Image (cartoon, rainbow, N blue to C red):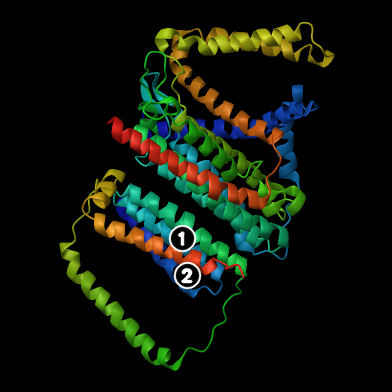
């Protein structure tokens, strides 16, 4: 097969999947937060509000696109474009799975593997701050400027602990290529997985926690969403943006969230590798989970507690059981099994992001800055030093 | 292919560099400087120094320039006004510029026939690390000391004594 054609095909598949995920993660977030707050969430458009993201997109597309007169026009237009572009680039180096063979074509489930893949992602994420800062400054208005300045200080401050947390698993894996980092976590010690978060001589539990906390700040999520704190700054850096330009910032935030969760999965949680060896039946985990989900859906759907669920719950249950049956086929297990593990881990981390948003209040600005410089950064450095010492003594 | 990319990004670097000097607004100058950094990173990557390319973007574009931009925004610097150049600049500017360009051109012309194609495998993380910690250990440590002194200086400058 023509390598260029293959590349284009893979890029199209990955981009399509990413965009659909971006649409639906907002639905998931609204649903999860609604249930945390004992509400139903979107319910009107489509079954269980499943078409709500499409309706929202349509609404944003059709809204009047305002260009305020007092803005710095070039930078004002550049900022949302920069935000979306940078947010979508990083996915190119994330490995989703091992080398697979489909219809005689062997290919990696990854768009491209750089020998400095980790640094590439860090470099791109360090540039994303410009989108926020430029949006704030070019709007030429008080609240956006404050939001932009906060974002700059916050993202520079939290990039350091993030870098420290990333460096420690690199010492264990001994490479900067994301694919090889995953491959280095492949060996099991009996049942014990070789993931960096559990790996001897120095398990990266602390490193993982530092990474996740810094990740919340880097993506401007609650409890660190000071750049867009709505009760202080209206909407922060994107106050003056409307319509599609506003949607770009929105999309970029979720794309960054997905990228950083994928990075955490690759660096700490063993990427596409299963939790326990294939010899002990990890291939059947997807089937078991899907069958459990199907059984639960059927249990609640027959008969349903609410009349409106009388069709949707049993239908979803039957679909889950069917998917479980499909995952029993060995070919499907080999092809989609690793992808299942990767998506399960990344999805769980994304759920944590949403869960935290529904649970924690926002920090005060001075607390936010003191936390990174006096606690998170030193902890990251100590973790890195301890890891280095353990690796040096262990080798 | 590599030549084309080199020409594009070399031209871009020069163009961005000119804009850094010619733009009147400090923010615009700073942004064009980021353009220079990123173009240079692409040139490093083209030479096979992928680690340096990434470090260039992370350190210069991602950290240092963010602080530049933030400080310019904080002090809300207005566009600078053109003043009539000083008499010395008017008299000496063009001759000195011409001399500098001539010297540069001469060196480039002398070096051109002997220029070797720089091959890859000299700029990986491993190579840079081992060079820093063996051959260039002393300069490396001295530079880190220099940075430490700068940090201490900043702390002393901002430290308020309790009266």
Q: Using residue A50 as the reference point, say whether residue A172 is left or right of it.
A: left
| A16 over A156 or under it: above or below | above
Q: Are marks 1 and 2 in contact (CB under 8 Å)?
A: yes
Looking at the image, which residue is at 46% across and 11% down? A283
Q: Residue furthest left?
A: B114
Residue behind mark 1: B35
The x, y position of residue A343, in whole percent, is: 53, 25
Count neighbours of disc 1 (C-alpha within 10 A) and say few if under 14, some if 14 to 19, many if 20 or more: many
Q: Label for residue B19?
A: 2
Instruction: Return the chain for callout 2.
Output: B
Quadrant of residue A37 within the rendered picture: top right
Looking at the image, which residue is at 45% across and 48% down? A123
Q: Using residue A351 as the reference point, say whether residue A281 is left or right of it.
A: left
The x, y position of residue A230, in whole percent, is: 74, 48
Quadrant of residue A32 within the rendered picture: top right
Is B141 in front, or is A131?
B141
Q: Using residue A350 as the reference point, say whether residue A202 is left or right of it.
A: left
Quick check: can you spot residue A121? no
Is A77 in front, or is A297?
A297
Instruction: Return the chain for callout 1.
Output: B
**Of helix, strand and loop, which one carries label 2?**
helix
The x, y position of residue A354, in whole percent, is: 66, 32
**Of helix, strand and loop, which one carries label 1?**
helix
Q: Which image quarter holds the N terminus of chain A? A: top left
Q: Using residue B45 as the reference point, say whether residue A163 is left or right of it.
A: right
Q: Earlier in the sequence, mark 1 or mark 2?
A: 2
Q: CA distance from mark 1 to mark 2?
A: 10 Å
Q: Label for residue A366?
A: none
Count neighbours of disc 2 (C-alpha within 10 A) and say few if under 14, some if 14 to 19, many if 20 or more: some
| A246 over B99 or under it: above or below | above
């Amino acid at each position: 097969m023509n390598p260029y054609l293959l590349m284009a095909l893979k890029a199209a598949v990955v981009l399509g999947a990413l965009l659909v995920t971006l649409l639906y993660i907002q639905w998931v977030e609204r649903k999860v937060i609604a249930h945390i707050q004992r509400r139903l969430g979107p319910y009107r458009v489509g079954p269980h509000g499943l078409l709500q993201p499409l309706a929202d997109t349509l609404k944003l597309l059709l809204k009047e696109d305002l260009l305020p007169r007092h803005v710095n026009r070039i930078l004002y237009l550049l900022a949302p474009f920069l935000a979306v572009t940078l947010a979508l680039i990083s996915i190119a180096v994330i490995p989703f799975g091992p080398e697979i063979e489909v219809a005689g074509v062997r290919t990696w489930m990854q768009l491209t593997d750089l020998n400095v893949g980790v640094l590439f992602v860090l470099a791109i994420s360090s540039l994303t701050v410009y989108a926020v800062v430029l949006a704030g400054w070019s709007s030429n208005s008080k609240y956006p400027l404050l939001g932009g300045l906060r974002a700059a200080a916050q993202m520079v401050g939290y990039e350091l602990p993030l870098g420290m947390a990333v460096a420690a698993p690199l010492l264990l894996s001994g490479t900067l290529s994301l694919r090889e980092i995953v491959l280095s976590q492949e060996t099991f010690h009996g049942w014990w997985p070789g993931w960096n978060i559990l790996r001897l001589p120095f398990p990266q539990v602390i490193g993982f926690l530092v990474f996740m906390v810094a990740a919340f700040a880097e993506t401007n999520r609650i409890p660190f969403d000071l750049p867009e704190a709505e009760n202080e700054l209206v909407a922060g850096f994107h106050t003056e943006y409307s319509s599609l330009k506003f949607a770009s910032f929105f999309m970029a935030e979720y794309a960054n969230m997905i990228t950083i969760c994928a990075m955490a999965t690759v660096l700490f949680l063993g990427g596409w590798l299963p939790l326990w060896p294939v010899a002990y039946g990890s291939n059947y985990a997807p089937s078991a989970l899907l069958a459990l989900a199907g059984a639960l859906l059927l249990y609640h759907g027959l008969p349903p507690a609410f009349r409106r669920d009388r069709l949707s719950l049993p239908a979803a249950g039957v679909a889950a059981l069917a998917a479980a049956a499909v995952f029993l086929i060995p070919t499907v297990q080999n092809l989609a099994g690793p992808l299942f593990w990767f998506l399960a881990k990344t999805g769980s981390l994304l759920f944590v992001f949403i869960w935290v948003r529904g649970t924690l209040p926002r920090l005060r600005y001075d607390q936010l800055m003191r936390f990174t410089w006096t606690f998170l950064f030193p902890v990251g450095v100590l973790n890195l030093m301890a890891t280095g010492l353990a690796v040096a003594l262990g080798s | 292919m590599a030549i084309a990319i080199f020409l594009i990004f070399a031209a871009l670097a020069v163009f961005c560099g000119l804009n850094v000097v010619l733009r009147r607004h400090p923010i615009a100058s700073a942004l064009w400087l980021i353009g220079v950094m990123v173009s240079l990173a692409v040139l490093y990557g083209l030479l096979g120094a992928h680690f340096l390319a990434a470090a260039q973007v992370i350190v210069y574009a991602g950290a240092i320039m963010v602080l530049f931009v933030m400080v310019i925004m904080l002090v809300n610097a207005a566009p600078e006004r053109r003043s009539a150049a000083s008499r010395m600049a008017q008299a000496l500017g063009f001759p000195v510029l011409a001399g500098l360009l001539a010297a540069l051109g001469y060196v480039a012309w002398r070096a051109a026939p002997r220029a070797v194609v720089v091959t890859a495998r000299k700029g990986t993380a491993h190579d840079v690390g081992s060079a820093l910690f063996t051959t260039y250990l002393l300069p490396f440590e001295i530079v880190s000391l220099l940075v430490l002194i700068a940090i201490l200086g900043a702390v002393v400058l901002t430290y308020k004594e309790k009266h």
